[in-house]
Image: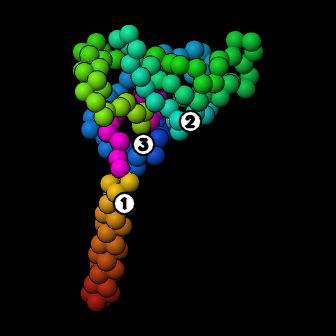
Amino acid sequence: MKEQGRKVIAQNRRARHDYAILEEFEAGVALKGTEVKSLRLGRASLVDAFATIDDGEIFLRNLHIPEYVRGSWTNHEPRRTRKLLLHRGEIDRLMGKTREGGLTLVPLSLYFNDGKVKCEIALAKGKKDYDKRQDLAKKDAQREMARAVGRAAKGRARELR
């Protein structure tokens, strides 16, 4: 039976904190058999991963997929460079944007989509420390407002009884 839907394997939570996400892309990943088996066990880390463009192709570097436990001599290297599969037009567009300056390619998540491994990469611009502080302050303010609304709603619910 073929898998349906989307099953997340790993996410890069730091990416949204450290970078301002401008555009997101879904790319296939060229993998070996033991890598897929290891990913099916839900084992991967995007912590140090980044994408580069070399000779008109996009590669994912430093993605850590641990060796498959039951693998033999055919096991893969955990941090090998993996090719990302995108349409030529998307690659050309990303090449132009990253050459413009200040923009980088960051992997956001790794997941199975209908049985195939996909990587969500983003065109991103690095945030300064003050941008990060502003985002945290905005997030805290949103959380406080939600709490206040929740408390008010609970108070109203008691009054109606």
Dot placed on the residue nearer the N-terminal end, 1 or 3: 3
* Residue 68 in the figure: left or right of residue 7: right
For disc 2, the neighbor class at 10 Å (few under 14, some 14 to 19, many from 20) is some
Count neighbours of disc 3 (C-alpha within 10 A) and say few if under 14, some if 14 to 19, many if 20 or more.
Answer: some
Instruction: Give the quadrant of residue 107.
Output: top left
Is 143 inside the magenta-drawn segment? no
Residue 1, percent from left and from top: 51, 22
**Res. 35 image quadrant:** top right
Left or right of 145, for residue 70: right
Instruction: Residue under label 3, please give it.
Output: 15
**Residue 77 drawn above or below residue 107:** above
The quadrant in which the C terminus is found is bottom left
Q: Earlier in the sequence, mark 3 or mark 2?
A: 3
Label 1 crowding class (10 Å Cα cut-off): few <14, some 14-19, many 20+? few
Judged by depth in the image, the label closer to the viewer, 1 or 2, is 1
Amino acid type shown at disc 3:
Ala
On residue 133, the disc is: 1
Residue drawn at (29%, 81%) of the image: 152
Residues marked 1 and 3 touching at CB (< 8 Å)? no
Residue at disc 1, secondary structure: helix
- At mark 2, the secondary structure is loop
Point out the frontmost of discs 3 and 2: 3
Q: CA distance from mark 3 to mark 2?
A: 13 Å
Q: Position of residue 54 (x, y in %)?
A: 40, 14
Q: Point out the stretch of residues depicted in magenta.
A: 109-128
Mark number, residue 30: none
- Tell me the tag on residue 45: 2
> Residue at left 31%, top 77%?
148
- Between 85 and 94, the one lying in front of the other is 94
Could you tell me the amino acid type at mark 1? Arg
